Amino acid sequence: MITITEKAEEYFRVLLKKQPPETGIRVFVSNPGTPGVECGILYCPKKSISFQDDVFERSGFKLVVDRMSQPYLEEAIIDYEADEKGHGTLTFKAPKLKTMNVPEDAPLRDKLEDYMRKTINPSLADHGGSAVITDVTPDGVVSVVFSGGCKGCSMANMTLKDGIEANLKQAFPGMVKEVVDATKHEVTERTYTLAK
């Protein structure tokens, strides 16, 4: 899936010698299939490896990649080049990073709905809730309606602004102006509440 050159592997081994034992290298993609897609490389302590990750044995270290990132990292190349003074540059090229989940010429609403379904709603489902887009204005105001555990939840505004709005703005830079709550909130037996 990912080609790591010998120089890059050696660079990682040198870096990892300064880290706690069993620390690996995590390669990830955030906001895949969106205009705001980014890839990154981090240290990965053993305790940070989850059931959503695959661990690959490399020459002298472990490479950790979450399964959602993997399709976007096919044909990726990580390389390391050092100049005559010993200053080096790590490069990360991933040609499939901008592969869209929906057609590139699809309306913004279709792209936002796809992102909500694949990225936002799985997190909301942990609290028995979900959110759907009901409107997208030409100037980028997105209206959402919460349901399930999110309907009537006292944390709904924080979820809206710090979660949904922040994620959509990052994934679709310059396209989303604001996310507003169009829900008629009422507390029901399904409403998520913090344990006392």
Image (cartoon, grey):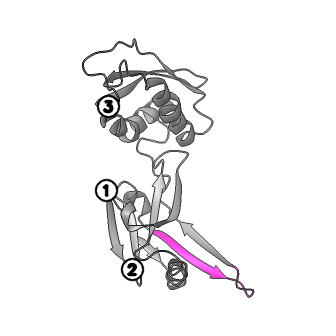
In the displayed structure, would residue 191 be above or below residue 172?
above
Which amino acid type is marked by label 2?
Arg
Q: Image quadrant of residue 191? A: top left
Q: Are marks 1 and 3 in contact (CB under 8 Å)?
A: no
- Pointer 1 residue: 52
In which quadrant will I find the N terminus?
bottom left
Q: Can you say which quadrant of the picture contains the C terminus?
A: top left
Q: Give the amino acid at mark 1.
A: Gln
Q: Which mark is residue 195?
A: 3
Q: Is residue 83 magenta?
A: yes
Q: Residue furthest right?
A: 85
Q: Nearer the viewer, residue 35 or 191?
A: 191
SS assignment at label 1: loop
Q: Vertical placement of 26 versus 181: above or below?
A: below
Find disc 2 in the rendering and name its residue.
Answer: 58
Give the spatial CA distance, label 2 vs label 3: 43 Å
> Which range of residues does the magenta coloring cover?
76-87
**Which comes sooner in the sequence, label 1 or label 3?**
1
Q: Mark 3 is on which residue type?
A: Ala
For image coordinates 46% across by 30% down, the residue present is 159
Q: Compared with residue 47, is residue 122 higher up or lower down, i.e. above or below?
A: above
Q: Secondary structure at mark 2?
A: loop
- Marks counted in the figure total 3
Mark closest to the chain's N terminus, 2 or 3:
2
The residue located at (60%, 73%) in the rendering is: 90
| Residue 178 seen anywhere in this rendered image of the structure | yes
How far apart are the alpha carbons under marks 2 and 1? 19 Å
Alpha-carbon neighbours of circle 1 within 10 Å: few (<14), some, or many (≥20)? few
